[in-house]
């Protein structure tokens, strides 16, 4: 399968250079996050804005959430990655579409589910223990990443079954992944910190 960027922009390099110029400017990190990460139509749906609405509505309906609590992030949103380990990598056919749900209700339901699982009484391999510690690190930051929970349990299985059901489909030939934040405050702070680091690196 080709690893070339999806051609929604005439020149993705220009898009990246424009973003670098924004980082070098005087706009505060919070404003950059709000304007470019939270606001606007994702790069992958530039020519079909209704598809983004449909995707958000389908995810919201599955989790009984409002569609405004659903956000696309990552390279699918910007057209390129700003994650430290993939910095400036363009979105490709093989990239994931990363979705974030911001919901204290859903977060607390999954928190209770994990608590009832009673992980402390379950033996873990070395790799499972590493993943679990990473899971806890994200959890402390108000972020649940089900992919890092080292065991199978009902809530985790349901989560992945749903996102699998909408992947490689009408929304594009990519895998769709989901993560969960307790509140918009946690969501915004995570991205603000990343933008602040990028601004330092570009000045």
Image (cartoon, helix red, strand yellow):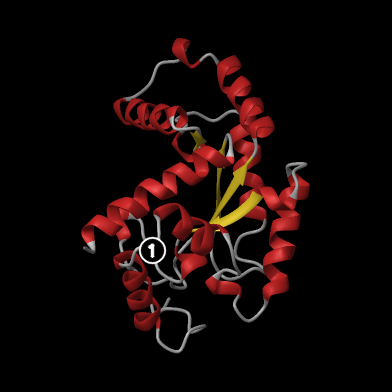
Residue 36 visible in the current orientation? yes
Give percent across and percent down for residue 111. Answer: 58, 24
Rendered view: 19 above or below 164: below
Residue pictured at 36% horizontal, 27% vertical: 133
Give percent across and percent down for residue 41. Answer: 61, 69
Say what secondary structure mark 1 lies in: loop
Question: Where, quadrant-wise, is the N terminus in this rendering?
Answer: bottom left
* Residue at the extreme front of the image, as rendered: 26
Q: Residues within 10 Å of mark 1 (few under 14, many from 20)?
A: many
Residue pictured at 50% horizontal, 60% vertical: 37
Residue pictured at 22% horizontal, 59% vertical: 201
Location of mark 1 (residue): 81
User: 135 or 93: nearer the eye?
Assistant: 135
Give percent across and percent down for residue 178. Answer: 56, 48
125 with respect to 75 (left or right): left
53 with respect to 176 (left or right): right
Give percent across and percent down for residue 7. Answer: 48, 84
Labels in figure, total:
1
| Image quarter of residue 134 | top left
| Image quarter of residue 116 | top right
Rendered view: 171 above or below 180: below
* Residue at the extreme bottom of the image, as rendered: 10
Rendered view: 134 above or below 3: above
Question: Where, quadrant-wise, is the C terminus in this rendering?
Answer: bottom left
Residue pictured at 29% horizontal, 57% vertical: 198
Residue 97 visible in the current orientation? no
């Amino acid at each position: 399968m080709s690893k070339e960027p999806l051609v929604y922009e005439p020149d993705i390099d220009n898009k990246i250079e424009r973003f670098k110029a924004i980082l070098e400017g005087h706009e505060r990190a919070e404003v950059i996050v709000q304007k470019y990460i939270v606001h606007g139509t994702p790069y992958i749906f530039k020519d079909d804005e209704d598809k983004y609405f449909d995707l958000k509505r389908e995810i919201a309906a599955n989790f009984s959430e409002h569609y405004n609590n659903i956000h696309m992030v990552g390279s699918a949103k910007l057209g390129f990655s700003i994650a430290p380990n993939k910095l400036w990598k363009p979105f490709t056919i093989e990239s994931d579409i990363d979705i974030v749900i911001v919901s204290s209700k859903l977060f607390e339901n999954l928190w209770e589910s994990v608590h009832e699982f009673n992980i402390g009484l379950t033996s873990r391999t070395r790799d499972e223990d590493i993943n679990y510690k990473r899971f806890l690190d994200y959890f402390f930051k108000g972020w649940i990443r089900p992919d890092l929970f080292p065991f199978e349990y009902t809530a985790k299985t349901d989560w992945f079954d749903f996102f699998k059901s909408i992947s490689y489909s009408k929304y594009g030939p990519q895998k769709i992944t989901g993560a969960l934040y307790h509140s918009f405050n946690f969501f915004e702070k995570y991205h603000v910190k990343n933008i602040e680091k990028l601004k330092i690196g570009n000045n």
